[in-house]
Image (cartoon, rainbow, N blue to C red):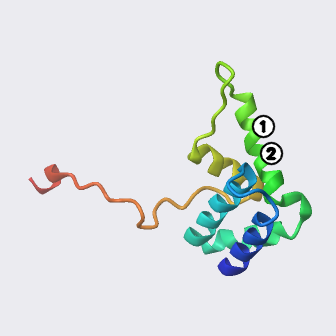
Amino acid sequence: MTQRAIDMLREQQSKVKERSAPWMVAEQLMDICRREPHSAELIARDLENPDMGIVQAEKKIKAFADAHKNSGFSCVTPWEAEEILREFYGLGSADTDDGDFPKILNLADFL
């Protein structure tokens, strides 16, 4: 299912300008698919709906950026963008206990 979602994202990505905002949304969604196969299944199912494509997802991120302008400048952090995408596609919270993050070792525990 992961590969199917990635293929669907690449297909939509091929229809937008390279490195544009929707193109980058597809990149971020592919990263999520690779990390979380269960999310890939949900994304693939949603991508079958024309109202759930990468262009529509990017519009949600742009709306957030526009609502948070500061001195005429708007920006969305990668984490904020991922949270917006997770909400848009109904993915739930990020899996943070998957071994990708280093564990903190407290040397005081050994004393």
* Above or below 104: residue 75: above
At mark 1, the secondary structure is: helix
Q: Position of residue 108 (x, y in %)?
A: 14, 49
Against 75, is 95 above or below?
Answer: below
What kind of element bears circle 2? helix
The furthest residue to the left: 111
Which residue lies at the image location 28% right of the left edge and 54% below the top edge?
104
Q: Which mark is residue 59?
A: 2
Residue 61: image location, x then y, percent: 73, 43
Q: Is residue 24 left or right of residue 100?
A: right
Mark linked to residue 63? 1
Q: Position of residue 62 (x, y in %)?
A: 75, 40
> Which amino acid type is shown beneath numbered disc 1?
Ala
Left or right, 47 with respect to 87, comes to: right
CB contact under 8 Å: marks 2 and 1: yes
Farthest top residue in view: 71
| Image quadrant in which you'd find residue 36 | bottom right
Q: Residues within 10 Å of mark 1 (few under 14, many from 20)?
A: few
